[in-house]
Image: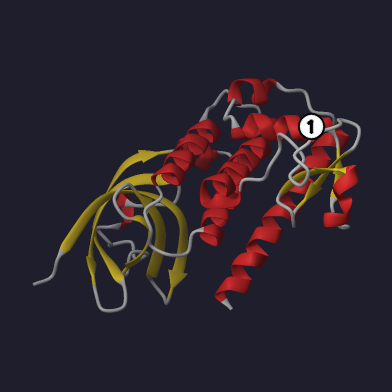
Amino acid sequence: MTTHYKTRALVFKKTDRNESDRIFSVFTDDFGRLDVFAKAIRKTVSKLRSGIDIFSFSDIEFIQGKNRKTLTDAAASERFKNIFQDPRRFDVARAIGEILNNLIRGEEKHQDVFDLLKEVLYKLDNQDMKNKKYVLVYYYFLWNALSLLGHRPEVQRCNTCRQKLDPGSVYFSDKVGGVICKECLGQDALAQKINSDIVKILRLIFNKDWQVLSKLKIENESEELFNKVSENYYSYILSSYSSVNN
């Protein structure tokens, strides 16, 4: 007898297959990440079509086959309309979906990541949010997702000698996994020199202090440096994932 599973799902990615099929990558309360196959859902006559879409909550039902999960029912429960209506918000949401897709590849429950995803989508959907903060939402999600998945860098003290940081001589090391002082540069010759603004931003992100973070005035130079440090660390973690899988 075929077993039907029901759960509340948040769609973070969709991939078209064949002429009318689609695979939905979803996060759920009950099962974590799932990739669910939807047969002929792109046809206008499909009864499932209105019940599930990217960056929306849906109550779904699926069956487990030999090689895949197949969607059998879907009812939309909540849509983030401001994300859909603003291309800039949508692009940020799509980039957040790619982070999830890259960092979580197996079916394992991650309630904390699920809650983080909900939090950032509600933030991004807030109509009062100014467009300059959209990218900050992305990095807020990136760093907290990395932290929850075991890749939180040290930002309180030098990660090598454990001494207090000198604001004028701070470096970020992907290899060591956090900030290091000038005296410990021998541990990573490729460490990036940063400033106290970067350390402050990261501390606020890990404390999830969005109220202060969202009001923080960040100079253009520090913003560019923060973005660079973030992308470099993200790439470093992804490369370590690839090494393990290969």
| Residue 168 x/y as whole percent | 91, 32
> Going by the image, does 241 lie left or right of 176?
left
Residue drawn at x 50%, y 38% is 121
Residue drawn at x 65%, y 59% is 237
| Residue 158 to residue 94: above or below | above
Task: Say what secondary structure mark 1 lies in.
Answer: loop
| Residue 124 to residue 212: above or below | below
Q: Can residue 131 be seen in this view?
A: no
Toward the viewer: 203 or 223? 203
Q: The C terminus is located in which quarter?
A: bottom right
Residue named by callout 1: 164
Q: In which quarter of the image is residue 45?
A: bottom left
| Residue 53 x/y as whole percent | 40, 52
Residue drawn at x 90%, y 37% is 169
| Residue 239 x/y as whole percent | 67, 66
Q: How many labels does the image show?
A: 1
Residue neighbourhood size for the residue with mark 1, other residues' Cα within 10 Å, grouped as few (<14), some (14–19), many (≥20)? few
